[in-house]
Every structure is written in C-alpha cells, then in structure tokens.
Amino acid sequence: MPHPKIKEYSKSTKEKLSFWKTRFYNIGTEREKSSREFQFLFLSWFSLLLFFTFFILAEKNPFNLLVPFNVFQWPRLDSREEVKIVISDGSAQQIPVSRKILIAEEKDLFIYQLVDEVGAPPYFSVKESSSKTDTLFQPKKLLNLQFALKKVWIRKEGSELILDWNTTMLESVMNDYRLPRLIQTESNFEEEAQANAPVDTITYYSGGEVSKTEGEEVTRARRLKALALTFKAVEATLFLNFPNLKTIEHRLDGFKKSFEGLEYSLGDIKQRPATSP
C-alpha cells in the first residue's frame, strides 16, 4: 500500500494540474479574463523555458553566462614562434626564409618539425616578398624526410647531433618525389620554368608522368640530386636554429655508410659553416 503522504501529494498534484488545465482552457476560449499578474507570471515562465530550450538545442551550458569572459573570450594570441627554414632553387643556391610554427618543447621533436618544414612547399612571407622584388629566385620543393628520420641523438650539451635515417623510407620518398617537368632541347633535357613568375610563387611543377624519352638513369640522377639538396637544406636549417650546434652526423639504419648513387657524402661529419646561408 502506498504511504499516506504519497497519496496526499499525488492527489494535490492532480488537483493543481486539473486547475491550471481548466484555467488555461477558459482563458484560451475567452470564458475567463486573465489578470495582469497571471500574464506576467505566464510570460516570465514561458521566456525562461525558451531560454533553457535554446541552450539545450545548442548543447551549451547556460550557466556559463555567469562566468566572466567565458562566453565572449579575450582575443587569442598567436602562440607560434618564428623560425628560419632554408629553401633551395633546385641547384646550388639556398636562402633562409621565415616560418611560424608551434615549437615543441622537446628538442628532438623540434628537429622533426624543422625537417618537415624543409620538405613543405616553399614560399616567401609578405615581408620577404616585398624585400625581394628585385631578386630572381625560383624556389623548388624538396623531399619531405620527416618520416624517414628514425632517431635523433643530441650529445655534448647540444654541440653534436646524430641523425639516423631509414634507408628504405629514403628510397621510397625519393621514388615518390614528383620531379619538375622536362622539355627537350637539341642537345639535352632542361627543366621547364616560368620566365615571369613572381618570387613568392611556388615554381615546382608536377609534371605527371616522366617524359617517355627520358631514361630511368636520368630520372634517378635528378631524384638523387633533389635528395642531396634536401640533406643540405636540413643541415643548414638545423645550424640556423641551434646556435650551440657544431657538428651534424648522418647514419643510415644505425651505421655510417653511403646511400647508393648519392654523390653527397653522408659519412662525413658536417661542421658548422663559418657564415650562415
């Protein structure tokens, strides 16, 4: 049997619901005139119901309005920091450019970020573009070797750096590298370039399939050249961003050995240049 109090509360609730139901019906059918007090209470509760319904549909917490600056926040500050990245024109010329990135606190992760930026599409910032209007420099995209870098060792308080590369990944990245389109002249092949291209334009062309008249040896030689330029750009970038760094050593699968066909020697220890690029 239900508790007497429960029966009492249940009966009282039914009576109130019946009363308000009848009251609303009479007001709606104009059998009874509503007082100003009733109208005020009705509009107040109805507005409150709409207010909470809106926040429920928007999946927001309405009590956030009580916390200062929780709904309308202060403008977010740019937490990125400027670093120097070395880019190449596809030949011997290399220049540093500015990039803004979220720098990782760990040095080894920061090195991975720099390697990734070297292989990203090259461009000049607005300030750099305006200052290089008279400079003829057509940047070429380099290889992204971030995932080919297996391990990083920082030794002697940051003065020595060892980079261990995965040979299989290097070969895979090099084979997937899309070379600039070639045009055939009377004597040899030359890379196609835009004569009137602005300096802030990415002048790297995805030529699709390699020309049928170009041999596999020529294609591999061009890819090996791009790989060598990427290693040089990575080294120059690391020296720029680590002032205390004096030497960089490359290893392939943990050993000091050369990459097949690569003229740029990875076995030699790279010393910090006397002047920055």
Image (cartoon, helix red, strand yellow):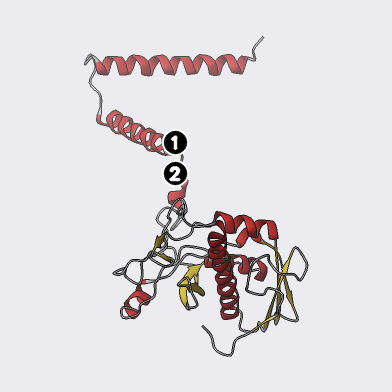
Residue at (77, 66) in percent of width and height:
254
Asked where in the image residue 58 lies, by quadrant, the reply is top left
Asked where in the image residue 247 lies, by quadrant, the reply is bottom right
- Would residue 236 appear left or right of 125 to someone viewing this image? right
Q: Is residue 269 above or below residue 41?
A: below
Q: Farthest bottom residue?
A: 274
Q: Dot 2 corresponds to which residue?
A: 62
Looking at the image, can residue 102 be seen?
no
- Would residue 25 appear left or right of 98 to someone viewing this image? left
Check disc 1 and report its element: helix, strand or loop. Answer: helix
Q: Residues within 10 Å of mark 2 (few under 14, many from 20)?
A: some
Question: How many marks can you see?
Answer: 2
Q: Is residue 249 above or below residue 41?
A: below
- Callout 2–callout 1 Cβ contact below 8 Å: no
Q: Farthest right residue?
A: 255
Looking at the image, can residue 272 be seen?
yes
Q: Dot 1 corresponds to which residue?
A: 56
Residue 248 image offset from top left, x and y in percent: 68, 78
The amino acid type of the residue labelled 2 equals Pro
Residue at (33, 66) in percent of width and height:
194
- CA gap between label 2 and label 1 equals 8 Å
The numbered dot on residue 164 is none
Q: Farthest top residue?
A: 1
